[in-house]
Image (spheres, grey):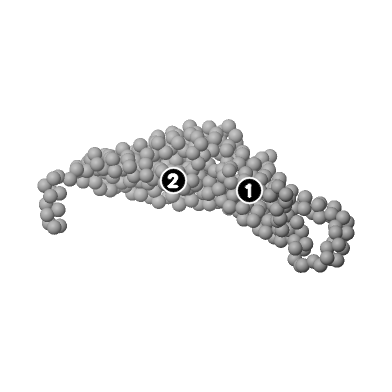
Amino acid sequence: MAAAAAVAVACVSRKMAMYGLRKFLFVDPDLGMRIRFQKEYVARIQDFFRTLMWWILPCFAVKLTREIFRFSHMYHESVWRACAVLFASVMSWMYLTTIVLSSCMLFNLVCNLQVIHFDDYGKVLEQDADPLFYLKEHLQLRHNLSKISHRFRMFLLLLFFSVTASQFAILYKTTAYNGPINFTNGGDIAVSSVVQVVGLVLCLHGAAKISHRAQNIASIASRWHALATCSSDSTYVSTPNSSGNLVPFPAHMFLRDYSESDLESLENGSTQGNSHNTAQLASYMSSYHKRESLVLYLLTNPGGITIFGWIVDRTFLNTILMFELTLVLFVLSKTIVIPTKTLVHSFLSFQ
């Protein structure tokens, strides 16, 4: 717990003091954040404090109960001394727990605030606007995610290593201990383990959530491009030219059979409508290529929270899960040993 709190103080508090609270949360109007997101900001910040209280209060109640139960068996002479030691122990633990959970929840809040902008970008993307506007908006979102990743990468990495080392040290001591484990000698370890794991899960959940939103933008853009192309492409058909490439022509030219006199009149009137069709075709092709370039850009630049180049998404979480499971099995193989006679007797009785 002390190691995780030290990581939080060293990383998060330093960055907050450097940039200030508004710029740290990316809600500064100078960074392009709009006033229309104010209600969503307030709702997410209220959820931040509500979630923090919901995690701290139960852990505090369990810790206080365990300390009262333990000190009632240790101190029988001086009541005031027992109360002083109890208060100092609970307050020190509460201070460390608040630092760990608040720092993890702060990173989760930063990610949730960016989710608001990605959801809004997905809604705006379904409108018929200039692709250059969409490109500039996405570049701003990518810039914010890059800065968040840069500010929190050391915090996430050190927090993961400290929590992992602490959990497996606890697992090793617990499985190697031959005596009885009860609420008195194991309650503190259990509560501290829950706090550390919850903090790490909150960080990974926030990072994976914003990475999923960022990667989903490419799917929304592809759907928008397909709908825009299908709705506007009905006025054109593609025919091969002399080079073998497909060239779109107005579809009304191919919707009916023309007689010889119709072809002559069509040839005479083609000169008058040639300029209009050429301009319309050029506008269509320009809009198509702009949308196509935007979709290709979004597909090749998905974005997300990264830790030194590794995107924190579902694949990354699966990798962490397999790594943790491997360590757990390794520790259990070193501490839990089943006697050969017991194993043979169990096998024979099963047969």
Judging from the image, what secondary structure is the residue with disc 1 in? helix
- Quadrant location of residue 143? top right
* Image position of 92 (left or right of 340): right
Q: Which residue is mark 1?
A: 295
* Residue 259, above or below 123: below
* Image position of 119 (left or right of 311): right
Nearest to the observer: residue 164 or residue 275: 275
Residue 178's label in the rendered image is none
Judging from the image, what secondary structure is the residue with disc 2 in? helix
Residue 317's label in the rendered image is 2
Which quadrant of the figure contains the C terminus?
bottom left
* Image position of 80 (left or right of 21): left
Label 2 or label 1, whichever comes before in sequence order: 1
Residue at x 55%, y 48% (from the top left corner): 215
Q: How many marks?
A: 2
Nearest to the observer: residue 234 or residue 292: 234
How many other residues sit within 10 Å of disc 2, few (<14), some (14-19) or many (≥20)?
some
